[in-house]
Amino acid sequence: MAEERGEGMGGGRVAADELRLLIERAERLEEEKRGIADDIKDVMGEAKSRGYDVKAIRKILAIRKKKREDYQEEEAILETYLNALGML
């Protein structure tokens, strides 16, 4: 069988050590990601305990990730739609 000979589904040889290292590296990164997510959760908990609105903070974080022009365009479209619906 191909799997017994160390061949992948495409028929090529699989470098088992290389594959194992890649998988282990991905596993370490996943663990780091969980740790960072926990740290962010702690920061948000601290913000909430100090009276800040966590939803607003998350919105600000999302806005700060965007290019200024993209954000301005999104806001202009939103305002146009809200006006059309009589919500402003």
Image (tube, rainbow, N blue to C red):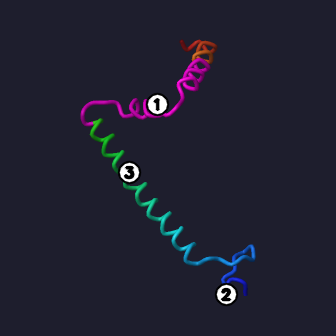
**Residue 78 x/y as whole percent:** 58, 21
Residue type at mark 3 is Ile
Tell me which label, 3 or 2, sits earlier in the chain: 2
In what quadrant of the picture does the N terminus appear? bottom right
- Residue 74 drawn above or below residue 24: above
In space, the residues marked 3 and 2 are separated at their CA atoms by 39 Å
- Residue 46 drawn above or below residue 56: below
Q: Quadrant of residue 3?
A: bottom right
Q: Is residue 38 left or right of residue 87?
A: left
In this view, the residue in front, 3 or 13, is 13
How many numbered marks does the figure carry? 3
Residue type at mark 2 is Glu
Q: Is residue 25 left or right of residue 2?
A: left
The residue depicted at 38 percent of the width and 32 percent of the height is: 57
Please give the residue where the numbered disc 2 appears in the rendered image. Answer: 4
**Residue 43 x/y as whole percent:** 31, 42
Please give the residue where the numbered disc 1 appears in the rendered image. Answer: 64
- Residue 59 drawn above or below residue 31: above
Secondary structure under the numbered disc 3 in the rendered image: helix
**Residue 66 x/y as whole percent:** 52, 31
Tell me if label 3 and label 2 are in contact, CB under 8 Å.
no
Residue type at mark 1 is Arg
Q: Residue pushed farthest left? A: 50
In this view, the residue in front, 80 or 43, is 43
Within 10 Å of disc 3 (Cα), the crowding (few <14, some 14-19, many 20+) is: few
Tell me which label, 3 or 1, sits earlier in the chain: 3
Assign the magenta stretch its main secondary structure: helix
The residue depicted at 53 percent of the width and 74 percent of the height is: 20
The magenta segment? 49-78
Please give the residue where the numbered disc 3 appears in the rendered image. Answer: 36
Is 62 part of what is drawn in magenta?
A: yes
